Amino acid sequence: MSGTGDSQQEWHAIRPWAPPLSLSVREISSVSATFILSSSLHDVDDHLALEAEAHDGDAEAGNAPSTSAIISDVLAKGLSVNVNEAPWQRVLIRIDDKVDEAVIIIYGLMPGRQYDIDLGLVQGSESNVIRRQVITEDFEFPKVDEATIEDDGSSSSSDQGAPSTPSSSSVSAGRPAVANGSPPSSVASSFTMEDRLAQVEQTLSALMSEKETLTQALKSARRDAQKTDAALRSEIDALKRASEKNSVAEQRARQRVLALQESVKRANAAREELEEEAAALEESLPGLERTRSEREAKHRELKRSADQARKARERSEEKARKKTAAMESELAALDTRAERLQAKRTKLEGTVLPDLEEQLRELERELQRAEMEELYGGELDEPLDTDVTEFGEVFANPLFPPRQPPTRAPSYPPLGGSDTPPSASPLPPPLTSQWRQRWKKRGAIAQYDTAIRTFAIIWLELEFAYTDDRSEYNNTADEEFGIDAVECCATF
């Protein structure tokens, strides 16, 4: 605890197991960098050790290394070296237990380059990282001058083994003189020239061996650097060739990437539109549900109506089918009757009608002859078919009914696929009541009436053979011929 005043005090926690460390640059060459790792408690430990040696003697001096061996303990726990954030294996470490310092040499570097060097130290449960940034020189590793070696050797002790730390050696060499507590004259008298020469030769041999070691390490580092440079150059050339070769593909890939980005933009826009449409559809979903319910209700009603209409149609079709069947049966009966009537008509036209026409013509000739005889008061010697043009004014008398030329009867529809039936001649007009009174005495008038009646009956049967309306039949018989239809049917 340390106090800064009467009214205010500050407490500081001192952890002897995690002492503060410092990393200083000793030397930088073109291919290596030398650092010195030391502790800030080093000066305090040295001062305490010197006082212990001065007052307590040699017995207490033996405990000094145990109190000052901080760097050894720290490095024993682990050390990691990273150069430009990459693990680095080309590292040399030399520990000086007397001065509690460590010389760290990092070799295999390239000349004229900048490096970030990180030293990772494990202190207890924590890790401490010390970073230094160095730039290597452009020239070769400098050679050590022999005079400098002799001067450094004169200030170092005989058991010093670290050639790269002359300052540390000088400090350690000065400690025995202080520990002995004797004046400088006694120290000078205790060392002879032979001892000094042996010490210098030993230091020189150590330096030469260290130089050879460093030279070999430098050569191997240069070879590795050359190999690395060659590999890097070949890799760079290969990358250049591959880049040139793949430039077209890269351009296409860039264009494809741009096209894909544009497609992604369009897809995002379309997705937003679809999301908006989906939201609108979700909003309109309740209305659509109501509309669907209404439509389903209407559909059910229409379906019921359609079922009713279908049943009604089936009933009407059944009625129509039955009616059609009845009409077909009736038509078949009518066809049978028509065929029977056609056969009857054919029989009448073929046999009875020609005979009746012949009789009618004969009766007409007889009637004409009787009229002529009645007119001239005697019988005619000429046949009835002679030319009577000289009696023109007689025939022009209105008492005689005019004789019309024979015309064909109207055509009748065919029966059962038969051809058009032959037509009959029209009936001759009946005699007037005046002529009937005049010719009552003659028997020809009765024959003529019989023939007229027979011909009228045949004509009526042929005319009304295709109809069941007997009222028109009766009216025609009464109006045209003045006869009773019932009597006609009975006579026929």
Image (spheres, helix red, strand yellow):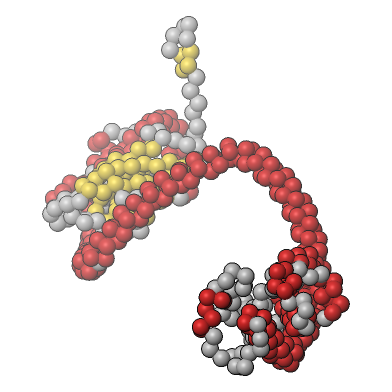
Instruction: Give coordinates of residue 455: x percent, y percent.
Output: 73, 81
Residue 168 in the image: above or below residue 387:
above
Residue occupying the point 79% across, 58% down: 311
Q: Nearer the viewer, residue 336 or 147?
A: 336
Residue occupying the point 56% across, 42% down: 281
Residue occupying the point 22% across, 64% down: 247
Residue 478 visible to an observer of this rendering:
yes
Outermost right residue: 490
**Left or right of residue 433, residue 220 in this image:** left
Q: Nearer the viewer, residue 33 or 144?
A: 33
Q: Nearer the viewer, residue 173 or 374?
A: 374
Q: Quadrant of the C terminus?
A: bottom right
**Left or right of residue 243, residue 399 in this image:** right
**Left or right of residue 140, residue 440 in this image:** right
**Left or right of residue 33, residue 8 in this image:** right
Q: Nearer the viewer, residue 347 or 14?
A: 347
Instruction: Give coordinates of residue 164: x percent, y percent.
Output: 26, 50
Tell me where residue 260 sits by quadrant: bottom left
Residue 63 visible to an observer of this rendering:
no
- The count of marks equals 0
Instruction: Give coordinates of residue 375: x percent, y percent.
Output: 63, 79
Tell me where residue 312 sits by quadrant: bottom right
Outermost top residue: 7
Instruction: Give coordinates of residue 482: x percent, y percent.
Output: 76, 68
Residue occupying the point 50% across, 19% down: 11
